[in-house]
Amino acid sequence: SGQAMWRYLRPARPAAGAPLALLRAQASAPKPLLPKLPQQPRARISSVASPSPLPERVSPEAIKKRQPKPDSWKDSRVTYRGGLYRSKGRSLFGRLMGRWRGTTIDLNHDFRLWHRHEEASRHVRLWLESLFLSQTLQRLIFPDLTIVAAVSAGIVAYNQQLLHAAMEHSAELAAKVASETALQVTMLPGMIALPTEPFSLSGFALGLLVTFRTQNCHGRYVEARILWGTLVNVSRDIASRILCTVPPTSAANLALREKGMRLIRSFPRSIKYHLTVDGFNEEIDIQGCAEVHILEKKDACYRDELAHIWNEKDAYGPAGLAPGMSAAGVVPDLDFPNRLLRKRVRSRPLWIVHELGEVTAAIRDSGAAGPIEVSILDNRILEYNNVLGAMERIMRTPIYRSYSHHTGRFVMLWCAAIPAAIYPIMGPAATVPTALLLSYMMLGIEDIGSRVECPWPSLPMWQYADTICDGVVQMRDQDAEKIVRARAGAVQPAKAPAAEEPTEDEALAEALRKAFSATAAAGSGEARRATGW
């Protein structure tokens, strides 16, 4: 814009050899005013704006195909290789590692998966069947275990070179080495070797460091799951209270009820995209993409999911308007997704929570519910804000980085130095595999902790969102069925149960009550004496 304005305001460059009078005339000429640019009309934000519903781009089945799935029915978890693990735009080695590595996500368990988890042969299966499919092993092969293997092989090669050089000058040493077993070793001056005492002393401190960090990271994982459980419970409670509190007696009430149901179904979807880089859509490739393009791809997938929630069908709920019910002056808020997906909306879950607050305010202003019911709804919506704030806190605040970095350096140094202590004990044949096994155990604990430190990519959030949506749809359909039956006159008042025969004590009490009533009405002493009172 500045360059265009400068081109417009600067004087025209005269041709070579122009007379001085022409230059003075151009300098003193008045500058024309800038043309007035037409102003773009601002978009209306009110809920009564003309609705422009989102087009239904893809089917629900196509949306479910985007979500991660287990490899077979036996798997209780899924290896997600989307997002940062996509292989496009990287080197050949990066593509190979990207196709192999991923994030392990434990799916929601049922009776079958729990039975498989508790099988007596689970330990054998974990070693023989799924060891090489373990994401921990795949993540540690390069570069951690590769460095340990290289250091171990270097120590063994150097020590063996010194031993063979000494054997060439000593027949006695050669005969001694020839009589040794595979786990026996002859040590010579100059060989790389370390005593085991430093590792015994430091191993206890290292175990405490790694265990303490892993426990803290697992605590964040447990807290994240508790927050999602709270979100499921609060969503069901808000949906039930709106359906039970707001009567379906007018078009405005029906529109408010349906808007509340759709906002509740949209909230977990927005959380899923708010806390992850790609919303668990394996089609999104973010490697080599700018932040703007990543957001555009996420918005496209989120728009497809919203298109099945905010559609023109059932704008007043599944039951629709009653015969003769007027919808004059009531405009269903179908334009909400377009306002939600604007670029200036920085926190879409917060936007949805605010819209839910406006729904409760509209319920209060219309008199559809009393102040106590509206206050309860406000408190439940406050739980949405608390859950959202706790989720963002976990997302934005890691464990103190100096602690994590010091633990990582300590573990890597310990694993790289352990081959020098193993060689004098295990010999050249067992040094490399023993060092790799110990390093895999120690580094694996630290790697598991680092993966669950930010727990959101490790949770099946798409399953939690589906659970909330399915529960809201079930209550919505149940309420619609009741409304349709009531309109059709199928709901009859319950008949009073048949009176049972009174017992002897009840009959005596009833007779005394009648006698006392008659005495009070008569007000005479003879009547009191006659009835025995």
Image (cartoon, rainbow, N blue to C red):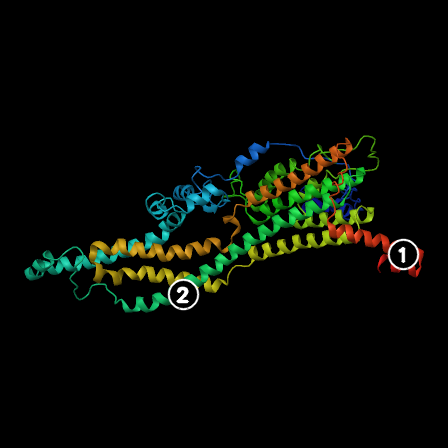
Name which of mark 1 and mark 2 comes first in the sequence: 2
Residue 318 lies in quadrant? top right
The local secondary structure at tag 1 comes to helix
Q: Look at label 1 and name its amino acid.
A: Thr
The local secondary structure at tag 2 comes to helix
Q: Quadrant of the C terminus?
A: bottom right
Residue drawn at the location 82% of the way across and 54% of the way down: 512
Q: Inspect this view and state whether residue 342 appears.
A: no
Q: Where is residue 343 in the image (x, y as percent from the top left)?
A: 66, 45
Residue drawn at the location 48% of the way across and 58% of the way down: 217
Q: Where is residue 7 in the image (x, y as percent from the top left)?
A: 70, 44
Residue corresponding to mark 1:
519
Q: Inspect this view and state whether residue 260 appears.
A: yes
Residue 368 lies in quadrant? top right
Q: Where is residue 228 in the image (x, y as percent from the top left)?
A: 58, 50
Depth-wise, is mark 1 or mark 2 nearer the camera? 1
Looking at the rendered structure, the number of numbered marks drawn on it comes to 2
Instruction: Give 316 or 7, whichever is nearer the viewer.
Output: 316
Q: Where is residue 526 in the image (x, y as percent from the top left)?
A: 91, 59
Mark number displayed over residue 208:
2
Residue drawn at the location 36% of the way across and 54% of the way down: 144
Q: Look at label 2 and name its amino acid.
A: Leu
Q: Are marks 1 and 2 in contact (CB under 8 Å)?
A: no
Residue 118's place in the image compared with 55, above or below, is below
Instruction: Give 301 or 451, whichever is nearer the viewer.
Output: 451
Give the CA distance from mark 1 to mark 2: 87 Å
Please give left or right for residue 531 compared with residue 389 in the image. right
Residue drawn at the location 26% of the way across and 62% of the way down: 420
Please give left or right for residue 342 compared with residue 115 in the image. right
Instruction: Give 199 or 368, whichever is nearer the viewer.
Output: 368
